[in-house]
Image: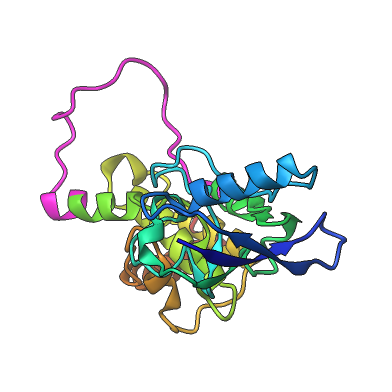
Amino acid sequence: MKLTLRVWRQKGPSDEGRFETYDVPDANEHMSFLEMLDVVNESLIADNHDPIAFDHDCREGICGMCGIVINGRPHGPKKHTTTCQLHMRNFSDGDEITVEPWRANAFPVVKDLVVNRSAFDRIIEAGGYVSAATGSAPEANSLPVPKADADLAMDAAACIGCGACVAACPNGAAQLFTSAKVGHLGLLPQGQAERWSRVVAMVERMEEFFGSCTNYGECEQACPKGISVNFIARMNREYLKAKFKDGRKLARGALGDE
C-alpha cells in the first residue's frame, strides 16, 4: 500500500509550524496507524532527520495518549476507535492522509503531534477523586449499588481522558470529559460525601481553560469510548442543584440560622 502523509511539524510551542509531506511506499494493511508512523520514523532516522514526535503508551486503546487528528477527525475515520487501534486497512492504496495535533487553545502544541493536556489534570485535581481512608479493601457486596447506577457509572468510567472531545468541539469545550468524571463518582455510594462540592469545583476549574458547550454534539461523535452527551445534561443539573444548595446555606447564615 502506497500512501502520502501530510504531517504537521512544529519544533516547539513558539514555532509557527508547517505541514511536511512524506511518502510511505510499503504500508501494510495490518499495521496500526502508530505502527505506520514508527516505520516512517525509522526511515527519517536512517536519513539523519528528526523523527515525528507523537504521544503513545499502552497502544491498547485505554491510556488516552494517542491524540492525533487524521483527515480532520480526532483519532481518524473509524468510530469508537483510538488512533493506536486504527488499522491501515481503513485506508486505500494511493491515499493522501493529513495528520495533525489536537487543535484547542487549552492544549498547546509541545512538538509536532504532541500537545500539553495538563488542563485536564487541573480539572481532576479540583475534585475528580474520593477522599477516603486507605486500608484493606472492603467486602465488595457491603455497599449495594442499584444496577442502573452501576451500569451508568461504568459507562462514564470508560472515559480515557484523551481529549478528542475538546479537539472536535468548535468551542474547544471540555464538558464531555468533565461530566464523565463527575458522573462516574457521583453515581456511586463512595462519591456521595463530596458530590456537591465536587461538581462545583470541577466545573468552575474547567471554565478557566475551556470554551462553553453549545450542544453541537461533535464530542460524542469523536469520543473513542462513545461517552454520551447525556452526561453533560446530568452534570449541568448537578451543578445547578449544588449552587442552589450553597445559596440557601449562605442565606440561612445571613439570617443567623447557622
Question: Quadrant location of the N terminus?
Answer: bottom left
Q: Residue at x 85, y 68 (%)?
A: 16
Nearer the observer, 139 or 91 = 91
Of 218 and 4, nearer the camera is 4
Using the rendered view, name the quadrant where residue 170 is placed: bottom right
**Residue sitting at 13 percent across and 49 percent down?**
146
Query: Does the stretch in magenta take in 237?
Result: no
Q: Is residue 24 left or right of residue 84?
A: right
Q: Nearer the viewer, residue 73 or 48?
A: 48
Q: Residue 90's quadrant in the figure?
A: bottom left
Asked if 204 appears above or below 160 in the picture, the reply is: below
Q: Is residue 94 above or below residue 149?
A: below
Residue plotted at (53% across, 63% down): 203
Q: Quadrant of residue 82?
A: bottom left
Left or right of 68? Residue 110 is right
Q: Main secondary structure of the magenta part?
A: loop
Residue 140 counted in the magenta span: yes
Q: Left or right? Give the position of 76 relative to 230.
A: right
Q: Position of residue 154 (x, y in %)?
A: 26, 49
Residue 224 is situated, as x and y percent measured from the top left of the image, at: 38, 60
The region drawn magenta spans 126-150
